[in-house]
Amino acid sequence: MTYTTGVLDILVIEDHIGDYILIEEYLGEEHLDIKLTRAATFQEAKDKLVNTHNYKVVLLDLSLPDVENNETLVKNMVSLSTNIPIIVLTGFANKEFGVKTLSLGISDYLLKDELNAPQLAKSIFYSIERKNIDLKLSESERKYKALFDFSPYPMWVLDKHTLEFLKVNDAAIKLYGYSTNEFLSMTVRDLWVSEIKEEIQSIWQENYHEKFNTSVKHLKKDGSIIHVEILSNPIDFDGRAARITQIKDITGQKDAEQALKHSEKRFKALVQDASDLIMIMDFAGNLTYVSPSSKQMTGVSDIEMIKNNFFYYIHEEDLKSVKENMLKLHEKKRIKIPIYRIKTANNKWRYIETIITNLSEDPIVNGLVANSRDITEFIKQENKLIDSLKRYDIVAKATSDTITDYDVVNDKMYYNEGLESIFGYSKNDIENTGAWWNEKLHPEDRERVRSYSEDVKNAKSGNIQIEYRFRCADGSYKYVLDRSYLIKDEKTNTVRIIGAMQDITEIQNYIQTIEDHNSRLKDIAWTQSHVVRAPLARIMGLVDLIQSYPNIDEQSQLLKHINTSARELDDIIRNITRKTEDATLNPR
């Protein structure tokens, strides 16, 4: 057997020169390139080992003059010869001690009397190779231990049969919150969530002798639950059947997946199930996505709509405006397109309001996102309102009445031009509050109007009709006939009062004139029925007396009385005539 890996540098610790020469001859027969160094004592060997570290092997004679105890010699040599194999050469055939030296770290134990060249060479070569293997194994174990202890992933070793923890690393301690001693008093079953214990036990048993990986939920010391992926391999651990397990905490991943699911649900609720029409397109109008709400809005399914260009559905009168607005997205992130019309499945038109966001640079979207809302009904109602306002404006201008609109909740009063034309107030004079209007009521009418209005409200009536006097800008008062309509909410509370103030001053004056005429006529009638009757009655009595007694002596005297009564009656008639003419020509 020949050593073929370079110079064989050997330290021979031998005090007997003859034995040293014999060893040299044996080695020369088996190896051409050999370098022997002799040390005759332990101290000499110690000095050489301390100063030189390139020996391939040490041959040790146990009979050295400076060491009496062989076991002590062996221990010291093993301590000095780190990573160098030691072969004991001795003349003592003590097998028990030979075995013991092997346990102390000696590579081989040879008897000098039985020694020969091939045996010595074989022992040297095997010892060197075995030492190299041991060194590699030690290095491997060191690296394994480092990988285990300092791995960022939690790891542990379990007894294959009982599932007891045999060893855990720092990452496992940090993740689960248990100390090393706590782990070593537990089994992995203590980490299993109760709802999946049977499932995990089944997986463990099915892969008893095999490598396996799975996802489970574990309990931490604080009671919180984490999601983990485990990778488990069977190993031999210090002579025990075991499993080494690596743990990966995927709680964050699970939470992210759950959040994504919720996000997808929200997307479905907001986009796919929403009433708004969502479309994704490029600047040329080519559609890449259309939400299912297209069917509800236009009667065209999303599958059919996406086959055509976006501009295909737009009314020709609105097309130019839509395209021009879309070009603004080259400079702006988001725009709002003014109201336009799109065609429905039955070739009718719906009014649409659209907001478009440019997400062309977003790799997920890669297009323009259009969010469109159907405002057809709003447009119809708006047109009706515009028509109504126009009619109101025409009526307000056509009537001579002052139109009022009182917001009860916010105490806001609005008027048409009648307040200026009828009562003389300028716009700067007018305050849009209920207090300003109340202050313009005649003091004698104010409480009556307030009381009547409250009575109407409490009676749940919808109409008010009342007359009062309203002060003009010049301080004079006009008579007003106020006809108002009360608008109530669902709780029958009055929220608005729409009214028309009609100027009835001339009518009121005419009525007053008639009443004055009636008063004068009553006075005339009373005069006719009472004052005229007295002298007329006297005349009639005197005439009757003369007719009944034609020969009465006082006839001349009677005629005198008749004449007096007649003149009195004439004065009364003249007075009545004068009053009648005065009432006719000078009405009050």
Image (spheres, rainbow, N blue to C red):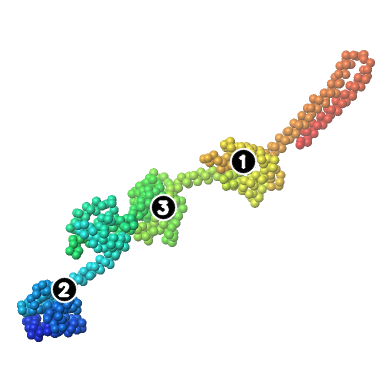
Residue at the image position 36 percent from the left and 48 percent from the top: 292
* Quarter-of-image position of residue 406: top right
Q: Quadrant of the N terminus?
A: bottom left
| Type of the residue with mark 1 | Ala
* Quarter-of-image position of residue 556: top right
Q: Quadrant of the C terminus?
A: top right
| Type of the residue with mark 2 | Leu
Residue on which disc 2 sits: 104
Q: Which mark is residue 154?
A: none
Towards the viewer: 105 or 32: 105
Sooner in the amino-acid sequence: mark 3 or mark 1? 3
Picture coordinates of residue 82, whole percent (x, y): 19, 77
Residue on which disc 3 sits: 371
Residue at the image position 67 percent from the left and 45 percent from the top: 440
| Type of the residue with mark 3 | Asn
Residue at the image position 73 percent from the left and 33 percent from the top: 515
